[in-house]
């Protein structure tokens, strides 16, 4: 046998493509060639594979060896092709039965001594292999936990090339020392929902109402107020109000976290909506994704189906913050690089928190703000108008009045989460014949046509639109929040009071009961 093949996987974003690894051994001077658009780290596989094969007790062919990766037009990056290349090479040399490598995908990086090291994106690769109809996949033992999260495919976790060859030959698998896990640049705690309870928040009834509505309808939120007023406390408790992810959503989110390196060897599906809180000094590429060659997911993709919380939002670079505009509307992010265009999911709830001014004391009772009007205006303009216009709910959070034991006990997270779950069930039932499940996702045109407000509620919003207090986008977003408030209270359609409250949540006005107003004639969006 002088020609053999195995299979591996190439990832472009989260999309997996099967790669056929061919090895041909021909007469000629000893030389190993690797073709098929490999990057620098993959080109080094020639030396890694040679050393690993020899140190595993096998004979490396002393003839001309050509290794091809097909399709040749697909860019290939990373070291996870090593084991597939080694098996194809030994199969071409007659050391392994070639039939045993068919319908089996292989991923893993080889050490020079034959050990198999963990790789990123094992879950996404296993999903691609399973959808292609393959029977089994061989992965590094440290990645076996996340690979086994995919149903319907046999996963073999291995520690060394010797164990892989034993599997292919159908002989007893030798025992090997466990491979040491590599240190991680990203911590799993980045996606862990904070172990906090809404019961800890003292007062802040308007803030609590805002995060309950945001959790129920999937609405974006802006909290602003002086330092220490409770903005971060409220934001950290938002993810705990959201229901668990469905199985399909869990696989989708877990695949992103696998590619980002957030899953460990004892991986489980990400069942809870993730909570991602990047620092305000985060770079643009760390937020949206990037890197040389094939891009990697950033913070907004790691927050998919969960919460992206940016504290001290005005301190973030305005250009970095404005990159959120497109994914806030579309629910995905495309990262363009010379080697490939990667598309990552990014349907997250954005929560921004900000102080009222650089010193934080503007508008605070019995406090003296030292900021000039120019400083105040410049600070508030660092969050652009287009970003603010995409935030459904805006609330000012002021320090709660401490009255000791006179404070009424607040509801715990579990109680509010039950209402949120019921509200989401009502939305799922209402939109069961559409592609959407949450009020925040429904296009405005469809909402106005199939789920319109009653006449008084619509007249109220038309008057605010005519007076300039609502934009066309704001008109639709108030409608969505009004439907969420109706779902929370179990009413079949938003009432005038609920629409008025939704408008106040949108504009940041104090939550006060509706009073009659003088109609203003004007255009309807």
Image: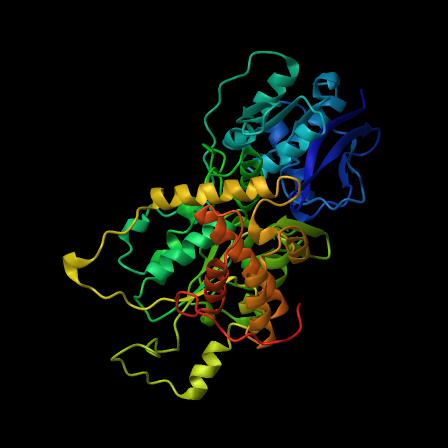
- The image quarter containing residue 116 is top right
Residue reaching furthest to the top: 171
| Among the 4 quarters of the image, the one containing residue 48 | top right
When the figure is inspected, residue 248 is found, relative to residue 347, above or below; the finding is: above
Name which quarter of the figure residue 122 lies in: top right
Residue 298, given in percent of the width and then of the height, sits at 56, 53
Q: How many marks?
A: 0
Along the line of sight, the residue nearer the viewer: 470 or 2: 470
Residue drawn at the location 67% of the way across and 53% of the way down: 446
In percent of width and height, residue 311 lies at 42, 63
Q: Quadrant of the N terminus?
A: top right
Residue at the farthest right position: 27
- The percent coordinates of residue 255 (x first, y second) are 57, 40
Q: Nearer the viewer, residue 428 or 45?
A: 428
Q: Is residue 466 left or right of residue 181?
A: right
Q: Residue at x 37, y 70 (%)?
A: 225
Would residue 432 be visible to someone looking at this image? yes
Residue 181 coordinates in the image, percent (x, y): 46, 37
Instruction: Determine whether 41 is above or below 288 in the image.
Output: above
- Residue 307 visible from this viewpoint: no
Residues 40 and 361: in front is 361
Foreground: 140 or 24? 140
Which residue corresponds to the image point at 31% horizontal and 76% vertical from the top-left?
A: 364
């Amino acid at each position: 046998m002088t020609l053999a093949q195995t299979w591996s996987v190439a990832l472009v974003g989260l999309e997996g493509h099967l790669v056929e690894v061919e090895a041909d051994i021909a007469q000629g001077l000893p030389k190993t060639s690797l073709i098929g658009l490999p990057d620098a780290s993959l080109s080094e596989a020639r030396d890694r594979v040679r050393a690993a094969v020899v140190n595993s007790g096998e004979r490396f062919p002393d003839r001309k060896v050509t290794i091809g990766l097909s399709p040749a037009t697909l860019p290939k990056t990373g070291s996870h092709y090593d084991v597939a290349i080694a098996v194809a090479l030994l199969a071409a040399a007659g050391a392994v039965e070639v039939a045993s490598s068919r319908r089996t995908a292989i991923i893993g990086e080889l050490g020079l001594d034959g050990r198999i090291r963990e790789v990123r994106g094992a879950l996404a690769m296993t999903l691609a292999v399973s959808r292609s109809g393959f029977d089994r996949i061989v992965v590094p033992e440290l990645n076996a936990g996340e690979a086994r999260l995919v149903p319907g495919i046999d996963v073999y976790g291995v520690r060394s090339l010797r164990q892989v060859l034993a599997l292919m030959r159908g002989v007893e698998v030798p025992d090997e020392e466990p491979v040491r896990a590599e240190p991680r640049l990203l911590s799993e705690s980045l996606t862990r929902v904070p172990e906090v309870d809404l019961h800890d928040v003292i007062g802040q009834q308007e803030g609590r109402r805002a995060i309950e509505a945001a959790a129920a309808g999937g609405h974006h939120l802006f909290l602003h107020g002086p330092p220490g007023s409770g903005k971060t406390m409220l934001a950290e408790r938002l993810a705990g109000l959201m229901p668990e992810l469905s199985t399909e959503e869990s696989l989708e989110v877990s695949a992103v976290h696998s590619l980002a390196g957030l899953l460990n060897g004892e991986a489980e599906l990400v069942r809870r909506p993730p909570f991602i809180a990047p620092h305000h000094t985060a770079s643009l590429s760390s937020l949206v994704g990037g890197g040389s060659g094939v891009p990697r997911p950033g913070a907004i993709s790691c927050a998919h189906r969960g919460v992206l919380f940016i504290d001290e939002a005005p301190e973030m670079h305005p250009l970095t913050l404005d990159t959120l505009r497109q994914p806030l509307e579309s629910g995905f992010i495309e990262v363009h690089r010379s080697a490939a265009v990667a598309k990552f999911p990014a349907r997250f709830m954005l929560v921004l928190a900000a102080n009222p001014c650089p010193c934080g004391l503007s508008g605070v009772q019995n406090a003296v703000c030292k900021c000039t009007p120019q400083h105040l205006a410049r600070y508030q303009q660092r969050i652009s108008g287009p970003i603010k216009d995409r935030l459904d709910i805006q609330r000012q959070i002021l320090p709660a009045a401490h009255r000791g034991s006179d404070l009424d006990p607040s509801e715990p997270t579990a109680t509010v989460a039950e209402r949120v779950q019921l509200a989401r069930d009502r939305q799922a039932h209402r939109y069961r014949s559409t592609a959407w499940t949450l009020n925040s996702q429904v296009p405005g045109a469809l909402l106005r046509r199939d789920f319109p407000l009653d006449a008084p509620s619509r007249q109220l919003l038309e008057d605010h639109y005519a007076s300039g207090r609502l934009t066309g986008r704001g008109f639709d977003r108030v409608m969505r929040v009004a439907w969420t408030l109706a779902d929370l209270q179990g009413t079949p359609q938003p009432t005038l009071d609920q629409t008025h409250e939704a408008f106040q949540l949108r504009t940041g006005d104090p939550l006060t009961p509706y009073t009659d107003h003088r109609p203003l004639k004007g255009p309807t969006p």
